[in-house]
Image (cartoon, rainbow, N blue to C red):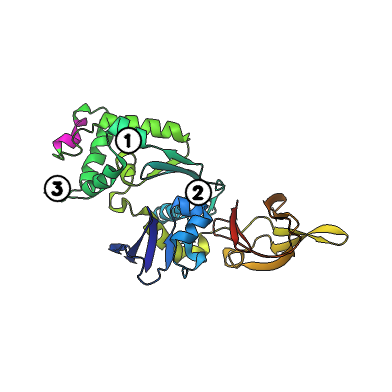
Amino acid sequence: MLIAELVNGQIIHTQVDDNNLCIINYNTNLEIPNCLILDYKAYYDIDYRKKMLPRDIDPIWLLSPTEAIAGYIKSKNGSITGSIMILDIVMGESHVSTIEFEEGRYSWNERKNNSNAIPINDLLNQYLSLSVDQIKDLGNFLIKKDSEDKTYAGIIQSAFKEYQNGHKEYEEIFAILDTPNFSHIKLSNLIAFREELIRRAGANLENLFIVVGVLGVLISDGIIEDCGLEKILGASYIQKHEQNFYPKIEGIIALELYVYPKLVKVPIYERHSTFEIFTIPKSIDIIDTGVITLFRGERACQIKTNNSMKKIHLEIYLDRNQNMIVTVDSTTYIVA
């Protein structure tokens, strides 16, 4: 299975074979992947997405980073239920998402925009004396193994737990491991970084709290072997178990039209439609009266248009996070 991930403007292709992973290329000219995981900017910004992606990737198999992480969480705990807060540390930002698992199915109710991105460049510098570029180097160091075949991430993770239990002799574990670029980092620095990151995120620690990525392995209970591959593994899981992963829509999706002598709601997708149905685009030609009104159940969502009083072409579908993707002639909108 070929899965791709959009990372910092590059498409990284990863071959997944029974969870044995191999990064095979950074070139976008390879065969079309089974699915592609978007970065946060490309998920929320349709115009940017169009510029970045090959034209022949099936839009049904574009995953948001949040649902890919949800797939990873589900793959590790098939019976998980309730609300989960995720911190995904990507380059110089931490992205906060709250997802739900109900009756084994995933949903993401806070998906309106990308305003949940928290800049952390200053935190990296203040507490860890690291730049964004150095985080990648730190990740490469952490997955290396010592003479006893133990990963450095595992050694530091164990020391971090012991330190939190009062064993202060582990404070300078980085220096003991003889890594010149990171020997200045103390475990007290990691704890201070973690506390400030949680404070900025407004994390509710009563919920299950997961930190994804390189720093997640150090300041939470992340699985070392999966470090940096959580989204790829999650996408692989979703492709195998999609029938039991996505929920049905709760209310109808409808378009408001004027049918003499009154406005009526024309159903686009019926209540309880499955993702196999609501991801199929529906098209209609309407007269441009200045505003397009869509309904999610009883809640109205509006898109302003040019009020040209001319015929315009409308295409609508829901992505798997149940955002409405609406194209008006050649302009596409994402509507939560």
The residue at the point 41 percent across, 54 percent down is: 72
Quadrant where the image shows the N terminus:
bottom left
Provide the residue span drawn in magenta: 170-176
- Which SS type dominates the magenta stretch? helix
- Image quadrant of residue 175? top left
Q: Is residue 138 above or below residue 265?
A: above
Q: Which mark is residue 124?
A: 1
> Is 174 covered by the magenta stretch?
yes
The residue at the point 36 percent across, 37 percent down is: 121
Q: Is residue 294 above or below residue 164?
A: below
State the separation of the CA atoms marked 3 and 1: 26 Å
The residue at the point 31 percent across, 42 percent down is: 132
Callout 1, which amino acid? Answer: Leu
Callout 2, which amino acid? Answer: Thr
In the image, is 325 to the left or to the right of 35? Answer: right
Q: Which mark is residue 52?
A: none
In the rendered image, residue 98, in percent from the top left (x then y), is placed at 50, 44
Q: Nearer the viewer, residue 294 or 292?
A: 292
Q: Which mark is residue 81?
A: 2
Mark 1 or mark 2, whichever is nearer to me: 1
Give the number of callouts.
3
State the separation of the CA atoms marked 1 and 2: 33 Å
Which residue in the rendered view is the most extreme toward the right?
Answer: 261
For residue 205, say whether it is visible: no
Callout 3, which amino acid? Answer: Asp
